[in-house]
Amino acid sequence: MGHLLTYAISAALPLLAMYIVYKWLLASENQYRYNRVVLLSIMLCAFILPAVNVLVQQFASNNATVQLMSPLPQPSIADDYAAQPTTWPRIALIVYLAGIAAVVIHMAIVWLRIARITASGTKIRDGRYIIVLTDDDKVAPFSWHRYIVMSLSDYKQAGVMITAHEKQHIDRQHWIDLLLAQFIVTVNWFNPAAWLVREELKAVHEYEADKRVLDSGINARDYQMLLISKATGMKFPTVANSLNHCKLKKRMTMMMTSQASMSRRLRTLAAIPAVALAVLAINHDAVAAALDHVNNSALFYSDDKESTPDIVIMGHDATDVQTESKHDDTYGISDIKVIGYEAVRKEPAPKPDDSHARDRKPMTSPRIFINGIEKDMEEIMKIDPSSIESIAVTRDDDDRIYVTLKDRANP
C-alpha cells in the first residue's frame, strides 16, 4: 500500500503547480471549451508524470556504472536480519487510507441520495432524456448521465429553461469529466489542488451550458433571473452538475464577456516550467529519501527473523548495488559480484540444513583480503571503488571478505 501513497504524493506536486498556473492565467478567460481540455489534461498529466519519472530513473540507473559515494565512518556487514522500519511512514499510510475511506463513504452517501430521488420521483421521457420530478422543493435542479432532476414547482415555473440547461450538460457528457475529477479527489484527497481543480471543472461546465442556452434563443435576462432564484437549494458536490453551482456573479460576467483571443491560449506554456520545478522537487535527495521510506511502508510488518539481511560493503548499503550472488549451504552467500548501480533487493538466502545448525557460530568481525593479501580496515577504506572487480563473502572457519582489484592493482 505504500506504493499508492508514494504515487499520490508524487502526483500532488505537479497537480498543484499546474493548478496555480491555470488559476493565475486562464481561469478568468472566456474560453470554456479550451479551459475544459486544459483542466482534464492537468488531471491526467499529474498522474502520468510520476510514472514517466520512474521509467526515466530506471533507464538512467540501468545504464550507469558503479559509483559509490564517500565511505561511512564504520564499514561493516550488517547482521540484523529484521531491521525495524521507521514509524512515521506507517502512520502516514494509515491516515492516507483513512482519508480515502472517508471520501468513498461520502461519495456513496451522495450516490444513495441521488438514487433515492430518481427512484421516488415522477419520470417523464423526453427523447433520450429522463426528467425526474420530485416533491421536495429544497432540491436544486441537477443532471446526471441521462437524468434531469428538478422539483415539481421548478418544472411548472421554468421547466423549459432548466431542461435546456441540463440537456447541455448531458449532451457534452460532463458527467464523465466529474467521474475523473472524483477519482483524482479520492486518490489525492490531501491535496487542496485536487478539490480546487474539480470545482474549476464544474464551473467551466456551467459556463459552457449557460452560453449554449443563450445561443439557443432564450432571453438572457429571464435566464439570469432564474439563476438568481435558484441560488439556494441542496447541491450534489461530487458527481452531478447542479444549476446553482458556481458563483452567480462570475457566471453572469462570463455571459457578457467576449471570447478570449487565440493568442492568449499561449499562456498555457507557463505550465511547463512549473511542472519542471515540481519534478525537480520530487527528485530532490531529501524528498526522494522520504518517499522511499513511504514506498516501503506497510500496515503490517512481519516478525520473521529469517528475512534477507542488509549488506554493507565499504560503508555502503549493498542493496543499492545490483549484484549477482551464489548460495551455499553454510552461510547462504558465497560470492557477490558488483555489476551495476541499481536499487534492487536480493532474494532471501535458502535456509541451511538443520544438520549444520550445531556448526554455526555468532558472526564476528570478518577478515579482509585484497588480491589474496590480508589487510586491515584502514587499507580497504583507501580503495578507489572504480578499481574493484569483484567482492566475495565466505564463511568457513571464520568470516572473510575477498576483494579483487582490476588488473591486480595494489590498494
Image (tube, grey):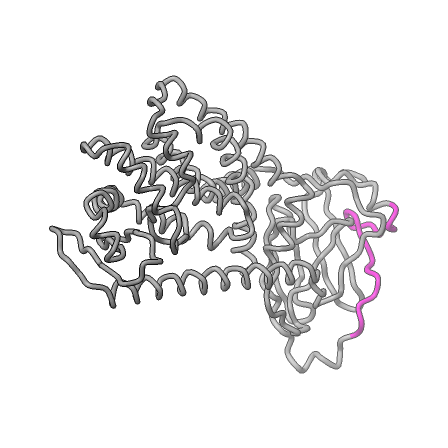
Q: What x and y, as percent, mark residue 36?
A: 36, 36
Q: What x and y, as percent, mark residue 319?
A: 65, 53
Q: What x and y, as percent, mark residue 205?
A: 33, 40
Residue at image point 70% right, 62% down:
87
User: Residue 171 in magenta?
Assistant: no
- Relative to 165, say whether 357 is above or below: below
Q: What x and y, as percent, mark residue 351?
A: 63, 74
Residue at image point 81% right, 54% down:
368
Q: Which sits in the foreground, 161 or 285?
A: 161
In the rendered view, does 194 fall on the left or right side of 116?
right
In the rendered view, does 24 fall on the left or right side of 398?
left
Q: Which sits in the foreground, 159 or 195?
A: 159
- Relative to 138, say whether 306 is above or below: below
Residue at image point 66% right, 57% down:
335
Q: Which sits in the foreground, 245 or 31?
A: 245
Q: Which sits in the foreground, 262 or 353?
A: 262
Q: Quadrant of the C terminus?
A: top right
Residue 108's image quarter? bottom left
Q: Which residues are magenta?
A: 361-378
Q: How many numbered marks appear?
A: 0
In the rendered view, does 337 fall on the left or right side of 15?
right
Residue at image point 23% right, 64% down:
121
User: Residue 375 in magenta?
Assistant: yes
Identity of the residue furthest to the left in this view:
127
